[in-house]
Image: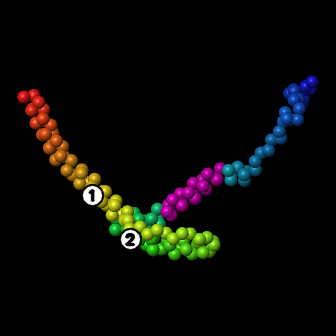
Amino acid sequence: MATAAPGGRRDRGAAALPRPRHRPSPAAVMAARLLPAVKFVIKGSLAGAAVYMAYDQGLLGSGTQGAEALRKAQAALPPAIQEWTSYLGWELPPTPKFDFSPSDSWNKGVQTVMSALSVAPTRACEYTVEGWKYVKDLVK
């Protein structure tokens, strides 16, 4: 049978014993409140550094500056990877050589879209005239 525990509560065994209340120390409370702010500052700093590096290397400039930055990266990356793989003792297969320029493809796509947009009003007028002629021929 359950017996009355001090304070008028019934004793239900060891699982129902009241837990002692531990108050966190003020330093722990302050650390818990500062942790999100510190994480935000660190993430913001990393994002800012990434944007600065991209700007500094010319990635946010014109297309020619971006192409030049890509060529620099293509020249600097293989030796750095080779150095790290030899340091770690890994062996990677050789990197394939591509004869593909993303900037040229991007510029070609932009030129095609802009060309289509520039002739769109003229084409719309031509198609409207052809449509009216077709409707007039059907009505006759």
Residue 58 visible (yes or no): no
Q: Circle 2 — which element?
A: helix
Q: Quadrant of residue 58?
A: bottom left
* Residue 46 located left or right of residue 26: left
**Residue at x 15% of width, y 39% of height:** 128
Q: Which residue is mark 1?
A: 111
Image x and y of residue 62, in percent: 34, 65
**First in sequence: mark 1 vs mark 2:** 2
Image x and y of residue 115, in percent: 23, 54
Q: Which residue is mark 2?
A: 68
Image x and y of residue 2, in percent: 91, 25
| Quarter containing the C terminus | top left
User: What secondary structure do most residues of the magenta stretch adopt?
Assistant: helix
**Residue at x 50% of width, y 72% of height:** 78
Instruction: Look at the picture and state if 140 lies above or below 28.
Output: above
Between 106 and 7, the residue placed more toward the observer is 106
Instruction: Look at the picture and state if 10 lies above or below 21.
Output: above
* Residue 69 located left or right of residue 93: left
Q: Residues within 10 Å of mark 2 (few under 14, many from 20)?
A: some
**Residue at x 13% of width, y 39% of height:** 130
Q: Residues within 10 Å of mark 1 (few under 14, many from 20)?
A: few
Image x and y of residue 114, in percent: 26, 54
| Quarter containing the N terminus | top right
Q: Circle 1 — which element?
A: helix
Residue 105 visible (yes or no): yes
Q: Please say whether residue 140 is one of the residues in the magenta stretch.
A: no
Q: CA distance from mark 1 to mark 2?
A: 20 Å
The residues colored magenta run 33-50
Amino acid bearing label 1: Gln
Q: Quadrant of residue 65?
A: bottom left
Amino acid bearing label 2: Glu
